[in-house]
Image (cartoon, rainbow, N blue to C red):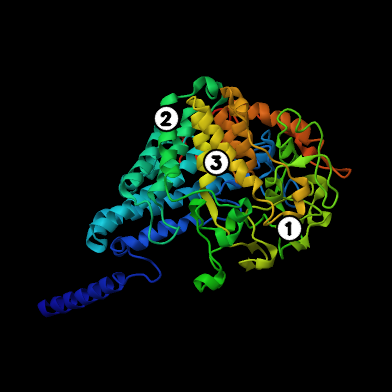
Amino acid sequence: MKSLNILAISFLTLGMTACNDFIDVPPTGVLDSEHAYQQPDKLVNAAYASLGDCWYSYPFNLWPYGDLGSDDCMKGGGGTTDTGYHPMEIWSTLTSTPGELDELWYRLYCNISRCNRALVSLQKHGVEVLGEETAAQRVGEVHFLRGHNYFKLVTMFRQVPWIDEEVMQNNSQEKVPNNQYSYEDLFGKVIHEFELAYDALPDVTEDGGGRANRIAAAAYLAKCYLTLAWGDGYEKSDGVAFINQEYMKKVEQYTKVVKDSRFGYLEDFGDIFLPEYKNSKESVFAVQTSQYDQDNTKYGRANWSIMLNGCWGMWSCGWDFHKPSQDLVNAFKTKNGLPMFEAYDDSDDYPLNGTPSAQKWDPRLFHTVGMPTFPYKYEAEYTMTKSNSRTPSTYGFYTSLKEVPQRSAGETFDGSWQAFATNDYVFRYTDVMLMRAEALIELGRLEEAREIINDIRTRAANSVNKHIAYAKDFCEIALYTASDFSDKDKARTRLRWERRLEMAMESSRYFDLRRWGIASSVLNSYFEKAAKSEYEKVKYGQYYKDAHYTPGKNEFYPIPYNQLYYVPGLYVQNEGYN
């Protein structure tokens, strides 16, 4: 009996050993977390890769929010039901349910998760694997990347949960509310991310443009302080009456760092938006893309944020989204070379190639807006016609030019979707100098602000012969005199107009209007006019009759429904939304 028991125990032991051997076999296709943490540089690379892990339904450049939500742009596409972006352009029907809002929130937090893991890896193994100097730089880069993602989240949604590496390691993500910090406190945490980056990073990185640097961190610090300087984001407590002078001084301080750096104005405005100049001195920081023949991959690293925005009939699959508005075109009108501030939209005008009129235009119009009868992105063999609009009776005949390459360059990906190897600017030099001019005006340094704006206008004036000589007879632009900047109100008007013309269709317009506390007055006036838009007797934009922007509600986008109820009671909704 005893021998039988020993035999049974022996078989049992063998069985348990075999079972343990089976269980301990690592699953294939899964990366062991501890093994991953031992490779900090690869986790940092993964955090960088997430900058471009976007799609048309969650574009990280925020064009459906910064442009569609403004007076610069119409959605485009096959009609108002094509994608869920229509509420973003009329505001009145905006709720928390569009999947696009949920996807954007989720994907930005996926990016933050990569940053958190990279920081844990650097804390554990950074010095031993990379050495002290490189490890410290990589830590600064990851803080920059995490700040970048949080800046977008706070800009969009205002109240967001702060999930850092400590929360991740404690696995307490589902216990962090989105109202733990005030708006200003959240911005303080974002600012701290960029301060850590600013202190850790060199002015120039070794890769030629893709990695974060100290100058880019300075640009972001200036942007954060500029946003806070005007108020808390809601019109009732935003605007000139709420300006924080100390924050404006911070803007001046950090933009001076950019001004004194190796970056500068690219000589021709048109070159800024051609792929061959993607990492020029104008590019302070940009999300990088590539052609397949540059990186030896099948399709290259395309810019998927803009995959809907190619001109209809011009590209193999141009879906005709991101359509400039007539109001934006009118804003480029000049009289004696200067903007027509009060009378710009007294009538809807548009140039027709070969028939110059008394109405003159800022040259940047022809670099920004594709128009029938004019070459598409400077190439006469691809001249636009009215047939290059997909739904003209809804969205008119204009197309966006900045984010696309020339047609002769072809697409990076040309399947059922097209995609382009055009970088997404996070900061270009001129943007930062306009922020500087804005701060200088509020600090009473009006002549310095005028000098910056005139430098930008000089570059615009010099951007005719190389690319748009065919439009030379349409263009007239002049510089501002001292009397144009004789007081802050005059200076603000000119700064804001210059920012609109220079940065048009680059996803910033709505956020500018909100910062200045004038979104409701500008947009509701625009909606009334846009409903009557007409191009050569074709009426469009009539859906704007249903549009309305409500201050105290629409300043920020609603917390997405799926996030609000993922852990019931954890998050609170933004003011004004149910």
N-terminal of the pair, mark 1 or mark 2, is 2
Find numbered disc 2 in the image and state the secondary structure of the residue it sits on. helix
Q: Residue furthest top?
A: 241
Q: Is residue 511 left or right of residue 129?
A: right
Amino acid of disc 2? Lys
Gap between marks 3 and 1 measured at Cα: 38 Å
Q: Is residue 271 left or right of residue 23?
A: right
Task: Determine which residue is flagged by label 2.
Answer: 249
Residue 471, image x and y in percent? 76, 51
Task: Determine which residue is flagged by label 3.
Answer: 560
Find numbered disc 1 in the image and state the secondary structure of the residue it sits on. strand
Q: Quadrant of residue 341?
A: top right
Q: Is residue 394 visible?
A: yes
Q: How many marks?
A: 3
Residue under the point 47% across and 34% down? 159
Gap between marks 3 and 2 measured at Cα: 35 Å
Amino acid of disc 3? Pro
In the displayed structure, 62 sits above or below 228; it is below
Q: Quadrant of residue 70?
A: top right
N-terminal of the pair, mark 3 or mark 2, is 2
Rendered-image quadrant of the N terminus: bottom left
Between disc 3 and disc 2, the foreground one is 2
Residue 143, image x and y in percent? 36, 48
Q: Is residue 328 left or right of residue 210?
A: right
Residue 33, image x and y in percent? 32, 61
Labelled pair 1, 2 in contact (Cβ < 8 Å): no
Q: Residue furthest left?
A: 2
Task: Determine which residue is flagged by label 1.
Answer: 376
Which of 500/238 is in front? 500
Q: Residue furthest right?
A: 537
Residue under the point 28% across and 72% down? 19
